[in-house]
Image (spheres, rainbow, N blue to C red):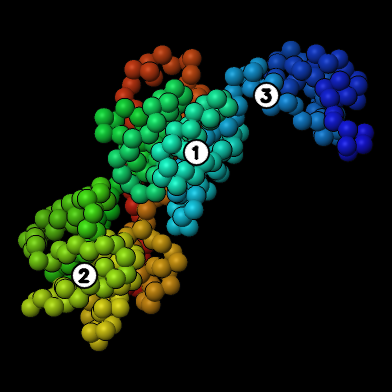
């Protein structure tokens, strides 16, 4: 057949030497087809390049094999691209593809995108945010299997997966303590968001667990950018008894802390140790010395979100008790990435 001719199911049947009904049964996974007939049909499909009409398949199976992915700006954020990679790879393995809409924080576009995806009969929805926060997704998201990624709703009525920020703060501080540091500064973010509160909670819990009194003057709040890290580090270095180590809210603030430490003629890690958070590789791996940091589990969150939806779709009509269970609220650990700054 010429490449410009659209291949039909009748063409496949003629090429395979079977009836149209047999081809249809093979396409729909019907069990009452002989092995020889199925092999002939599969061969004919391969040779002819036949593609079934997706809309017709969706009507028959009630599955589009598409997962919607709504995000405020993850798709345009290089350090969160691992979320997309984890989700896409897992969806593909599960026979699904992702349909992505980046809303750029526009609530009207967000609402319209969710409704459009539902109209297009996506099998499920992932609603993802740029940073860990409480969210208010469009109400329509509740019409189909959905999961929140890097965000949550206050009443826990939707499944969610977020980083374990408190444990990350605990592990970062514990790592410094295990390397002999007792006077540890913390440059925290200034805005009241879950990561700001929970990482501080983890820092304080680690001090308490190791019998180190909390000292409020060792905690400073600045915007989590290089200038904020620089200013915060200078404040700590100006203390009568400055810290021997500092935990930074993120890698960008750690980059500013590096500059302040060097400006004072101090060495990392010989004079002062530094640990960050996020593992933004363009920053952390390229500082000198390389920055030890806690990695946000972006890739793992993308995997978990899709795996959850696949399990929910598989359970539809099978597990009556599933509807009665509370949606899971999952915390994923932040792994330590060891480099040379401690």
Q: In what quadrant of the picture does the N terminus appear?
A: top right
Circle count: 3
Under circle 1, the secondary element is strand
Residue depicted at 86% across the width and 34% down the height: 47
Q: Earlier in the sequence, mark 1 or mark 2?
A: 1
Q: Earlier in the sequence, mark 2 or mark 3?
A: 3
Tell me: residue 78, above or below residue 90: below
Q: In the image, 14: left or right of 75?
A: right
**Residue 214, percent from left and from top:** 8, 60
Residue 174 position by quadrant: bottom left
Observer able to see residue 23: yes
Rate crowding at label 2 as few (under 14), some (14 to 19) or many (20 or more) other CA atoms within 10 Å. many
Rate crowding at label 1 as few (under 14), some (14 to 19) or many (20 or more) other CA atoms within 10 Å. many
Q: In the image, 64: left or right of 124?
A: right
Tell me: residue 88, above or below residue 55: below
Q: Which residue is mark 2?
A: 232
Under circle 3, the secondary element is helix
Q: Which residue is mark 1?
A: 69
State if disc 1 and disc 3 touch (CB < 8 Å): no
Residue depicted at 47% across the width and 38% down the height: 109
Q: How far, Cα to Cα, is label 3 from label 1?
A: 20 Å
Residue depicted at 16% across the width and 73% down the height: 235
Q: How far, Cα to Cα, is label 2 from label 3?
A: 57 Å
Q: Earlier in the sequence, mark 3 or mark 1?
A: 3
Q: Which residue is mark 3?
A: 55
State if disc 2 and disc 1 touch (CB < 8 Å): no
Q: Nearer the viewer, residue 248 or 2?
A: 2
Q: Nearer the viewer, residue 121 or 163?
A: 121
Q: Nearer the viewer, residue 323 or 226?
A: 226
């Amino acid at each position: 057949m010429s490449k410009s001719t659209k291949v039909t199911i009748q063409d496949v049947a003629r090429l395979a030497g079977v009836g149209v009904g047999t081809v249809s049964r093979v396409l729909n996974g019907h069990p009452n087809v002989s092995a020889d007939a199925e092999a002939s049909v599969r061969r004919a499909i391969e040779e002819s390049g036949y593609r079934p009409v997706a809309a017709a398949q969706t009507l028959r199976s009630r599955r589009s094999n598409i997962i919607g992915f709504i995000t405020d700006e993850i798709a345009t954020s290089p350090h969160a691209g691992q979320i997309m990679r984890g989700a896409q790879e897992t969806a593909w393995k599960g026979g699904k593809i992702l349909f992505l809409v980046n809303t750029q924080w526009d609530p009207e576009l967000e609402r319209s995108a969710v409704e459009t995806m539902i109209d297009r009969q996506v099998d499920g929805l992932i609603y993802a945010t740029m940073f860990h926060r409480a969210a208010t997704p469009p109400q329509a998201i509740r019409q189909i299997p959905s999961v929140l990624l890097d965000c949550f709703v206050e009443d826990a009525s939707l499944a969610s997966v977020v980083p374990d920020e408190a444990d990350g703060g605990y592990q970062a501080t514990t790592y410094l303590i295990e390397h002999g540091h007792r006077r540890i500064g913390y440059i925290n973010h200034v805005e009241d968001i879950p990561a700001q509160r929970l990482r501080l909670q983890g820092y304080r819990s680690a001090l308490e667990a190791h019998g180190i009194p909390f000292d409020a003057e060792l905690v400073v709040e600045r915007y989590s950018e290089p200038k904020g890290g620089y200013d915060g580090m200078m404040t700590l270095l100006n203390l009568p008894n400055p810290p021997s180590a500092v935990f930074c809210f993120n890698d960008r603030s750690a980059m500013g802390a590096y500059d302040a430490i060097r400006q004072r003629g101090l060495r990392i890690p010989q004079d002062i140790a530094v640990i960050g958070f996020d593992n933004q590789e363009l920053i952390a791996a390229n500082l000198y010395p390389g920055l030890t940091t806690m990695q946000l589990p972006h890739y793992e969150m993308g995997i978990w979100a899709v795996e959850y939806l696949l399990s929910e779709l598989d359970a539809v009509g099978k597990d009556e008790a599933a509807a009665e269970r509370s949606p899971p609220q999952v915390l994923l650990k932040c792994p330590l990435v060891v480099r040379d700054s401690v």
